[in-house]
Image: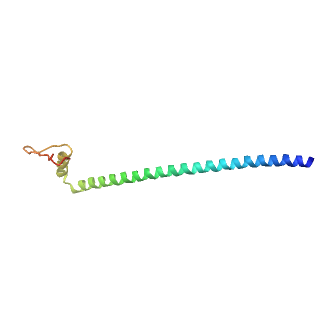
Amino acid sequence: MAKQKTNEKTDKKTRSTSFFLTLAIIVVIGYFVISLVSLQMEKNEKAQQVAQAKATLAEKQEKNDQLSSVLEDGDDSAYIERIARDVLGYVLPGERVYYDISSGN
């Protein structure tokens, strides 16, 4: 009978230890899963930022190429006239500018 009580106590200790060990393993696995998901989301966000940066870089390189071609051509007067007309809205003396408002744009 004394052995039986000892075995019962050992079984209770083993079950208790086994339960806490299982619980600890589940908590650790949960932590790793949450960390993995978090890192994946962060990776996707960084990939989007890289894609946006590449698009911006391509835009800036295209504009830089256009400006370089203007400098190489040496035809500054045509470039200045185009900027004055398109951006600043200037016109030549005596020139009339008509705007088509029927298109709805």
Residue 50 horizontal side relative to residue 15, left or right: left
Along the viewing direction, whichever of 11 and 81 lies nearer the viewer: 11
Residue 68: percent from the left, percent from the top?
A: 27, 54
* Res 101 quadrant in image: top left
Along the viewing direction, whichever of 39 and 20 lies nearer the viewer: 20
Image point (43%, 51%), residue name: 48
Residue 7: percent from the left, percent from the top?
A: 87, 49
Residue 55: percent from the left, percent from the top?
A: 37, 53
Colouring used for the render: rainbow
Residue 30 horizontal side relative to residue 16, left or right: left
Image point (29%, 55%), residue name: 65
How many discs mark residues in the rendered view? 0
Residue 76: percent from the left, percent from the top?
A: 19, 51
Image point (29%, 52%), residue name: 63
Along the viewing direction, whichever of 33 and 86 lies nearer the viewer: 33
Image point (33%, 53%), residue name: 59
Residue 77 horizontal side relative to residue 25, left or right: left
Looking at the image, which residue sits at the far right? 1
Looking at the image, which residue sits at the far left? 94
